[in-house]
Image (cartoon, helix red, strand yellow):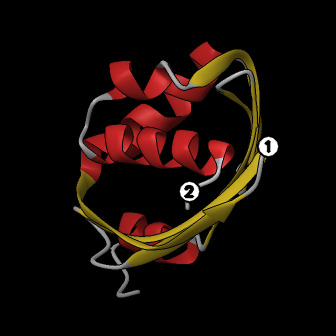
Amino acid sequence: MTSPAEKIALAYFEAWTSHDMDRAMTYVAQDVVCDAPAGRIEGAEAYRDFMTPFVGILRNATLTASFGDEETAVVVYDTETVPVPSAPAAECVTVRHGKIVHSRFIFDRAPFDAARAGRPS
């Protein structure tokens, strides 16, 4: 049985991993706050600006696991991108009134930094 927050998190995941940022953003609150390895992102426009470049290099995403309750959900996945063949990540979201109001991304930036520098990861 999928929880309410998990349903939103999975719908959002399916949208952005299908390269549909317009649909993905329908699940994101205007005042969203995102804590990512690069720092805090505030507001839907800044969040979209943060996600769009990554979605642009995304080749594939595989869902590993998801779980949640009424307001919180965690989605664990592995992404294949143009520069990095395997980039596991997790996202913990808080959902209120059917929208993601907070997101915490957990991923290792080192393989991406190495790819940008032309080093093997």
Q: Mark 1 or mark 2, which is nearer the start of the sequence?
A: 2
**Number of the front mark, 2 or 1:** 2
Outermost residue, front side = 1
Query: Can residue 12 be seen here?
Result: yes
Horizontal placement of 54 versus 92: left or right? Answer: left
To which residue does mark 1 refer? 71
Q: How many marks?
A: 2
Q: Residues within 10 Å of mark 1 (few under 14, many from 20)?
A: some
Residue 98's tag is none
Residue 117 position, x and y percent, is: 41, 69
Residue 34 position, x and y percent, is: 74, 38
Look at 65% across and 25% down and name the residue there: 98
Secondary-structure class at tag 1: loop
Horizontal placement of 24 versus 62: left or right? Answer: right
Which quadrant holds the C terminus?
Answer: bottom left
Look at 70% across and 59% down and name the residue there: 68
Look at 34% across and 37% down and name the residue there: 15
Which quadrant holds the N terminus?
Answer: bottom right
- Say what amino acid the circle numbered 1 marks: Glu
- Say what amino acid the circle numbered 2 marks: Thr
Q: Is residue 106 above or below residue 71?
A: below
Q: Is residue 33 above or below residue 54?
A: above
Residue 110 position, x and y percent, is: 56, 76
Residue 3 or 82: which is nearer the viewer? 3
To which residue does mark 2 refer? 2
Q: Residues within 10 Å of mark 2 (few under 14, many from 20)?
A: few
Residue 115 position, x and y percent, is: 37, 71
Q: Is residue 38 above or below residue 30?
A: below
Secondary-structure class at tag 2: loop
Query: Can residue 90 be seen here?
Result: no
Look at 36% across and 40% down and name the residue there: 16
